């Protein structure tokens, strides 16, 4: 069946729940009065997704730095024990 492989957006679900006639008209290609709000919502979610991905990468980098610091402290402690004798 054509159209079965497309995703249904949260906006479409919201439109359908709010007004089934508005959803039907949108499916028929009639313009919605909410285009600006939907565009703003899409932009917000794209920025949020970008910020979330940046935070995930920063956390991974911070973990690497912590592991390297702990390893360096361990090596310094071993070197001190070895050379203090």
Image (cartoon, helix red, strand yellow):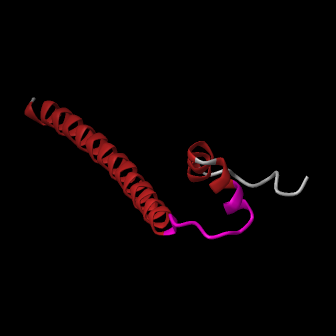
In the depicted structure, whether residue 36 falls above or below residue 73: below
Res. 68 image quadrant:
top left
- Can residue 7 be found in the magenta stretch? no
Return the x and y of residue 19 as percentages of the image width and height.
Answer: 60, 48
Residue closest to the eye, 63 or 67: 63
- Looking at this rendering, what residue extends furthest in the left direction? 84
Q: Which residues are magenta?
A: 24-35
Between 67 and 28, which is closer to the camera in this rendering? Answer: 28
Q: What residue appears at the point 17 percent right and 39 percent down from the top-left corner? A: 76
Give how far across and how far down residue 23 sits, in percent. Answer: 66, 54
Indicate left or right for 15 with 80 as reference.
Answer: right
Task: Indicate the quadrant where residue 44 lies.
Answer: bottom left
Q: From the viewer's perspective, tell me whether residue 21 is left or right of residue 47.
A: right
Quadrant, the C terminus: top left
Work out which residue is located at the far right of the displayed protein and give it. 1
Closest to the observer: 85 or 10? 10
In depth, the one of 74 and 61 nearer the eye is 61
Residue drawn at x 45%, y 63% is: 37
Q: Position of residue 21 (x, y in %)?
A: 67, 52
Residue ID at (40%, 61%): 47
Q: Is residue 10 left or right of residue 7?
A: left
Is 29 magenta? The answer is yes
Q: How many marks?
A: 0
């Amino acid at each position: 069946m054509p159209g079965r492989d497309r995703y249904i957006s949260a906006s479409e679900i919201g439109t359908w729940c709010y007004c089934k006639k508005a959803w039907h008209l949108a499916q028929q290609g009639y313009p919605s009065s909410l285009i600006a709000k939907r565009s703003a919502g899409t932009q917000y979610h794209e920025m949020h997704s970008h910020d979330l991905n940046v935070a995930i990468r920063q956390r991974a980098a911070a973990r690497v730095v912590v592991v390297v610091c702990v390893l360096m402290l361990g090596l310094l402690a071993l070197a001190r024990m070895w050379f203090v004798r």
